[in-house]
Image (cartoon, rainbow, N blue to C red):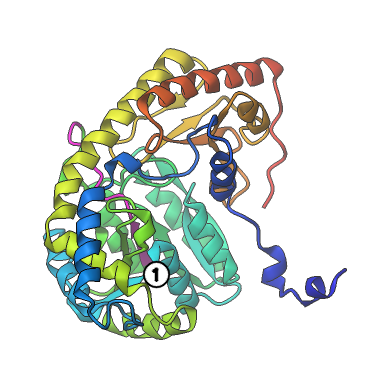
Amino acid sequence: MTVHERAFSRMGAQLTGSAIRQMGILAAGRPDLISFAPGYPDPDTFAWDAYRDIADDLLRAREADLLQYGPTRGYAPLLEALVPRLRRQGVACTTDDLLLTTGSQQALDLVTRLFVDPGDVVLVELPTFTGAIAAFRSAGARLVGVRQEADGLDLAHLDEVLAVERANGARVKFLYVIPNFQNPTGGLLSLAKRRALLDWSRRADVLLVEDDPYGDLWFPDVTRAEDTRPIKADDDEGQVVYLQSTSKTLAPALRTAWVVAPPAVIERLDVAKQSADLCSSTLDQRLVLEAITRGVLDAQLPRLRETYAHKRDVMAGALARECTGLASWAPPRGGFFLWVQLPEGLDTRAMLPAAVEANVIYVAGAPFFVDGSGHHALRLAFCAASVSRIEDGIARLAGVIRTAAASGRPVPPAGP
């Protein structure tokens, strides 16, 4: 064992890479590979000309603070501009309730550091976002899954899980949910269940952490804006910590997201962020502010909804042609992802080498589950690939599934 291996902390020794990141790295080195793995926005949707003009105006102005360190909490005019946008979504707040972060992933990390001690329980959906799993585990949390139904979290199972954990003396810190076009399933939590979850949070005295990167990407043919109303919009007791991001609407490279929470929480997150990065990019935040005030973001949203709804239709149509009888899926009502389930007994992680050989990749389902299940599921991202590559890629994937089904490849034993 080397000196650095002996020096690793217990958590450092257990760190593992993201399955999504690993697939993204593989795709980056293989332009011939059709990737349905990372949830990257379509670069053709970026407002290139508007961003060029904004950057040019900002840099030509040569304002002294543009390229300086900024406040840890974020650029004040952007915080002020976010308040009316959030209020239009029903989220009543002031700048005292807001903190800007370097993407939602940093927000997850900071929230976890603030609330979780080693051994505490965090409740998550089955399945849930792998980035959240990594953030929670990095703090030593024990993750406990709650099943999902067609309209979102299984509330009866949630009550059962909480009762078991409390009977065993566990400290349950919060429930993490992605109500809008969930990653990885693409599911939409019903309005009735949103209200019920908030009531549950009050009764159970358990915080909700609501992650909402996809809420603006609802598809008009099957969804209304009001169907995506944040749980936070009806929270008048500070039960919900709400996360939102520009990564899926403006551009991931801007790394600008925010947390909405009671001022006492924001103040402590501010202190925690000081030890993480002192401040996020002021330049990025200024670009985002200009994109909001110049109407770029609002102009983008209808185009994004139309683009991604069309790609969903293309992928769902290709699956219907190629995979009927081989798999099951439900076309999402918004977002980036389509969740596919294969027959029990197939292992989508074991299928990956054959998929790579066929020049198509996806994310296997198991990493999204905290209970060792999900081996026969996979996530397909329809957001970045072109229409022709979606159709070609699904045809290739169908061939891989047929071969695996014919071979009867077994699923490995479930593990923790």
As shown in the figure, which amino acid type bears the numbered disc 1? Val
User: Quick check: 356 left or right of 78?
Assistant: right
In the rendered image, residue 231, in percent from the top left (x then y), is placed at: 26, 59
In the image, residue 250 sits, relative to residue 109, either above or below, namely above
Residue 4 lies in what quarter of the image? bottom right
In the image, residue 305 sits, relative to residue 261, either above or below, namely above
Residue 23 lies in what quarter of the image? top right
Between residue 192 and residue 359, name the one nearer to us: 359
What kind of element bears circle 1? loop
- Magenta-drawn stretch, dominant element (helix, strand or loop): loop
Q: What residue span does the magenta drawing correspond to?
A: 208-221
Residue 120 lies in what quarter of the image? bottom right
State the residue position of label 1: 206
User: Quick check: 319 left or right of 349?
Assistant: left
Quadrant into which the N terminus falls: bottom right
Residue furthest to the front: 60
In the rendered image, residue 207, in percent from the top left (x then y), is placed at: 37, 69
Q: Is residue 382 visible?
A: yes
User: Quick check: 282 left or right of 135?
Assistant: left
Q: Residue at x 85, y 70 (%)?
A: 2
**Residue 239 sits inside the magenta stretch:** no
